[in-house]
Image (tube, rainbow, N blue to C red):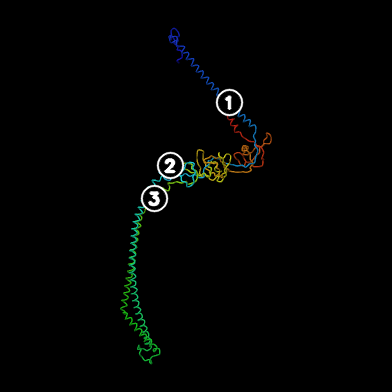
Amino acid sequence: MANETEVKDTPEGTETSEQKKTPEQKKEKPVKKAKTFDNGRKKKRKWIVRLVIIAVIALLIALWVRNVKKRAEEALAALTSVETQAVSVRDLLRSIPATGTVVSLESKEVPGTLTGTQIASLEVEVGDRVREGDLLFSYDTTQIMKNLVRAQESLTTAQTRNALTESDLARSVSDAGRNRDYAVDAAQETIARLLQSADQARKAYEDHIALRDQKNNLQYNYESLLAQYKALTGTEDTDLSGNDLSPEAARLLPAIAQARTAASSAAATYQADGGDAATTSLMNAYNQSMYSYQDALKSYQNTVDSQNSAVAGARSSRTSAELGLNTAAEEDLVESYEQQMEKAQVTAPISGIVTAVLYHAGDTYAQGPVLTIQDDSEYEIETQISEYDISDVAEGQKVLIKTPATGDEELPGHIIKIAPVATAGSGGVTYTVRVAMDEPCDRLRLDMSASLSILIEEHPGALTVPYNAVQEDENGQTFVEVKKGEDEFVRVDVEVRLESNYYTEIAPGPVKEGEEVKLISNTEINSLLDQLTMF
């Protein structure tokens, strides 16, 4: 160390380093002693400060221990003075407590309609009230209108061009139809003429055949009478005297004469009409006219088929050409720009209050909602119920609602919707439940907090004791201790029917309304005693 004195052995004896120093060096010794004295005082002050700090800490610990002991003594004293409460009859409710938020009946996010288009004007801001159909915002339609005009001009040009082409095609179909009608009419006239000729030939032939048949029939009749006469007289001579004839033969003579005359006349007529030679000629003429008629029918059918085919071909060509003349692309383009013009002004889908605005005039719309509207004409409460309690919750159950804005007033409501699936979060698994207000309240506002009591069970006129008056023995039997004297309590077994947050319903019978029951509460004392075990 720099302040230590060095000692060395010499022949004359022990000589210190101080004895060997020069007079000039010895003059500096008092200065070195002064520095050593100052360092000692600094060390002494540090120890004093440390002792003071330790003393203060010890004092604080002593005060804390004394305070804890005092509180424990007060609690122990309170334990020796038993607290009681009277059995009472009240309407008992079992409920599930929950916290929720005041929400609107309906919330609508209004999306943009024209991606990549500038918003020209925004008619609302947060807090504004709107009615369904009110204008919310508009787009800049300058470019859209230019595009629409160009698309309409293109459509008009295409329609005019197609109309001219369709006119030409229609003319072709009309010409084909007209040619068909002319050819068919001519074929029909030929058929009619040949049919008339055939009918005439047939009639001439049939008339001639009728003359021949008449001649033959009259000749046959004459020869039959003559044969009968010959059988009676033995001769064909009809000039015999009547005296020599039998009465039967005599009666045949007039008929024979008449038949001979008729046969001769018919034969003369038949011969005048051409006789047998005319029969063959007339038959050949009739057959030839029928052949011509049949050929004309075939020709007519061929004409009809070929002309119909020509018309069908013209129509097919027209249809095929028209398929290539449609203006669907131009029409779709015009419709697209017209729809964009219709979408350029966006109106409110519902009535309510604007609660969010995400774009401003001059912004180019990209995606997502532009603003949000909430229907605050009425309110609902939205809450989260844990998976442990959700099985006891059902639609239609009554709910009592309290909010900071309404103070101690309990607002009635009922459950209207329970989410079918859970929501997992840091607080565990919960289910979203919506509660409707049974009565309107003008003091509520969106997003206010609310305390809820979902009524699971109601027991009007129940016999109740405080929840901390009911005890249970090792066998699971529930009982209360009923006060019978100044410091005397008697155990009475009871049947618990319903437990709420503060009171428990017991079956009437062994315990009567108005009797005092002992309350059990050691929570605070046990906590203090646990602290005392540290000392």
Answer with left or right where residue 154 lies relative to residue 456. Answer: left
Classify mark 1: helix, strand or loop: helix
Answer with left or right where residue 508 lies relative to residue 381. Answer: right
The quarter of the rendered structure image containing the N terminus is top left
Classify mark 3: helix, strand or loop: helix
Q: Which residue in the protein does label 1 denote? A: 63
- Between 59 and 507, the one lying in front of the other is 59
Q: Residue at x 62, y 30 (%)?
A: 74
Label 2 or label 1, whichever lies nearer to me, is 2
Q: Residue furthest bottom?
A: 243
- Between 50 and 129, the one lying in front of the other is 129
Q: Amino acid at mark 3?
A: Val
- Between 533 and 63, the one lying in front of the other is 63
Chain-order first, disc 2 or disc 1: 1
Answer with left or right where residue 527 lies relative to residue 372. Answer: right
Gap in angstroms between the C-alphas marked 2 and 1: 68 Å
Classify mark 2: helix, strand or loop: loop
Q: Which residue in the protein does label 3 denote? A: 334
Q: Amino acid at mark 2?
A: Ala
Q: Do the residues bearing badges 3 and 1 touch, measured as CB atoms within 8 Å?
A: no
Chain-order first, disc 3 or disc 1: 1
- Between 495 and 296, the one lying in front of the other is 296
Q: Which residue in the protein does label 2 denote? A: 361
Q: Quadrant of residue 473?
A: top right
